[in-house]
Image (cartoon, rainbow, N blue to C red):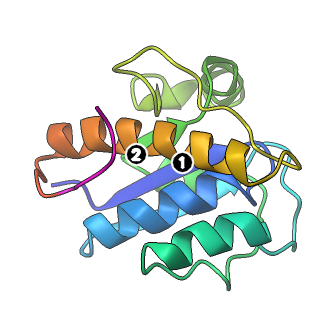
């Protein structure tokens, strides 16, 4: 059984907090964390991300950006990054993690687009990509109850 999942993006204030909130909501018994490769340490989640999550009944308003550290990667059983480049950066910095680092959009072979400073439409497009990626990963983990807008 998976007990700890790490979600990684660049700044840890947009994509990974939204994915963390959704995944934690879908897997209440699993410790879901997030971090950034170039985190905006101490910053709150982007207000647009917070608003989109509130619309889904998930509160990420207390999220604070944090930098990816060795212990995060070591303790997670699965590490889900937003882009292929981020996966490579994690594996180069932490070679022991090869085999547990995957792209969130692995099934569709896509990078989840960064909506930082691009407005609500970009955040909605990003969230749609996150939904599709999470749907796939939850099927693999064994939770088939996740409902998304993924086609």
Say which residue label 1 marks: 127
x 59%, y 40%: residue:
125
Quadrant (top left, top right, bottom left, bottom right) of the C terminus: top left
Estimate the x, y position of residue 66 in percent, counting from the top left.
Answer: 77, 64
- The disc placed on residue 131 is 2
Q: Do the residues labelled 2 and 1 touch (CB within 8 Å)?
A: yes
Whether residue 71 is visible to the viewer of this picture, yes or no, is no
x 87%, y 72%: residue:
43
Estimate the x, y position of residue 42 in percent, counting from the top left.
Answer: 87, 74
The quadrant where residue 137 appears: top left
Whether residue 117 is visible to the viewer of this picture, yes or no, is yes
The Cα–Cα distance between marks 2 and 1, rounded to whole angstroms, is 6 Å
Q: Is mark 2 on a helix, strand or loop?
A: helix
Estimate the x, y position of residue 84 in percent, counting from the top left.
Answer: 61, 18
Horizontal side of 139 relative to 123 (left or right) equals left
Horizontal side of 57 relative to 65 (left or right) equals left
Estimate the x, y position of residue 117 in percent, counting from the top left.
Answer: 89, 50
> Where are the magenta residues, as a range?
146-151
Q: Is residue 15 magenta?
A: no
């Amino acid at each position: 059984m998976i007990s700890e999942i790490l979600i990684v993006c660049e700044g840890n204030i947009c994509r990974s907090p939204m994915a963390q909130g959704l995944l934690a909501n879908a897997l209440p018994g699993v410790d879901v964390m997030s971090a950034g490769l170039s985190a905006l340490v101490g910053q709150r989640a982007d207000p647009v991300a917070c608003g989109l999550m509130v619309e889904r009944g998930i509160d990420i308003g207390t999220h604070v950006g944090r930098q990816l550290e060795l212990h995060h990667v070591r303790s997670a059983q699965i590490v889900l990054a937003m882009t292929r480049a981020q996966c490579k950066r994690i594996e180069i910095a932490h070679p022991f993690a090869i085999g547990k680092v995957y792209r969130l959009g692995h099934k569709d072979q896509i990078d989840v687009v960064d909506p930082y400073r691009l407005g609500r439409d970009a955040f909605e497009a990003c969230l749609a990509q996150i939904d599709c990626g999470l749907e796939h990963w939850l099927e693999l983990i064994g939770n088939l109850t996740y409902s998304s807008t993924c086609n």
